[in-house]
Image: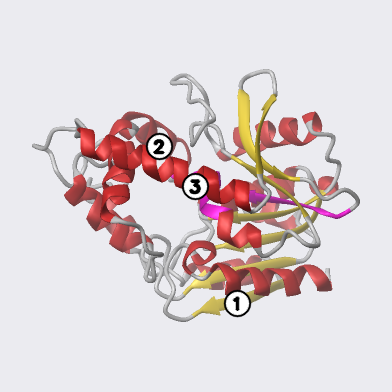
Amino acid sequence: MDFSHSTTSSASPCCSRQAQFGLWLYQQNMAAEAYCYGLRRRQADIGELTIDYYWYANPGKPTLVLLHGFSADKSIWLRFARQLRRHYQLLIPDLPGHGETPFAADADHSMPRQAERLALLLATLHLSQVHLIGNSMGGFLATVFASRYPEQVLSLALQDPAGLSSATPSQLEQQVRQGLNPFLQLDFADFTRFYALSMARPPYIPQLMLKGIACRYQRQRALLAAIFADFFDARLTAAELAQIKVPVLLCWGEEDQLIDISAAALWQQQLPQLQLQVFAGIGHLPMLEIPKQSATVYRHFLQRC
């Protein structure tokens, strides 16, 4: 399937100076926010590439690994992670091809291969057992990792995860099947439509910064198309899910337009130990739309594990 089409075909992908400044301003703001929360940016060489990540050291406490979704980066977890610092150690990586972790055109970005890279990262950082939480593609990755490396996972939490089909096709799925992938953008109008799909209750971001984020999507269009093609049509198997014996928390935004909430029923069928939390009036990114509330739900889940 060709994922290269966008909602606009005639606009120029070039970013204005204003948009470039907006992107710089947004990145500086995210870096400052992370620093204020005690999260420190680090890098780990896993052989194939160098993984960029945020680290919150809390010796003697359990380690949480937070995995972002497709086209996002580690900063998407900042306000969620802030709520968990007291009792946990935090690792928030930029997945390969995202954020500050490089993309290689000939690399395999399927979930099994990304799980291998995550295993290398944990080994490099000498983390033998962790609690995993992932959103969207990150939830897909977390599930694949928990299936393949069960001895390393203490619990699994998923926010609007990819990896299983939904009875009702989402707006994203309908558009992709029509050859109009909203992730692959050429101008600010494309980005505005995508932004409206991604969240029902987005946090406030000045328009200058939004134009900067749109600029980044335009610049990354080719690499996003390659990564998307590597995982979008993949699905978890019953055999893989049967390997997961740890406690599982599934959270879903009721208004999710990227992955329809009808998929939650299939997750429940496959993982009988699963606990489901639905957030009314929330879209695809609960950790960004309602960081305090969604982190509280997660913290209570961890306390019962």
Disc 3 and disc 1: Cα gap in Å? 28 Å
Q: Can you say which quadrant of the picture contains the C terminus?
A: bottom right
Q: Position of residue 20 (x, y in %)?
A: 28, 35
Numbered disc in front, either 3 or 1? 3
Lower sequence index among marks 2 and 3:
3
Q: Position of residue 220 (x, y in %)?
A: 34, 32
Disc 1 element: strand
Numbered disc in front, either 2 or 3? 3
Question: Left or right: where does residue 117 sit relative to residue 27?
Answer: right
The residue carrying pointer 1 sits among few (fewer than 14), some (14 to 19) or many (20 or more) residues within 10 Å by Cα, namely some
Q: Can you say which quadrant of the picture contains the N terminus?
A: top left
Q: Position of residue 114 (x, y in %)?
A: 61, 35
Q: Residue at x 64, y 53 (%)?
A: 37
Dots 1 and 2: beta carbons under 8 Å? no
In the rendered image, which residue does mark 3 sit on?
30
Disc 2 and disc 3: Cα gap in Å? 29 Å
Question: Left or right: where does residue 265 sit relative to residue 230?
Answer: right
The residue carrying pointer 3 sits among few (fewer than 14), some (14 to 19) or many (20 or more) residues within 10 Å by Cα, namely some
The residue carrying pointer 2 sits among few (fewer than 14), some (14 to 19) or many (20 or more) residues within 10 Å by Cα, namely some
Q: Residue at x 41, y 39 (%)?
A: 228
Q: Nearer the viewer, residue 151 or 197?
A: 197
In the rendered image, which residue does mark 1 sit on?
277
Lower sequence index among marks 3 and 1:
3
In the rendered image, which residue does mark 2 sit on?
229
Question: Which residue type does callout 2 highlight?
Answer: Ala
Q: Please provide the residue range marked out in magenta.
A: 61-77
Disc 2 element: helix
Question: Which residue type does callout 1 highlight?
Answer: Gln
Lower sequence index among marks 1 and 2:
2
Question: Which residue type does callout 3 highlight?
Answer: Met
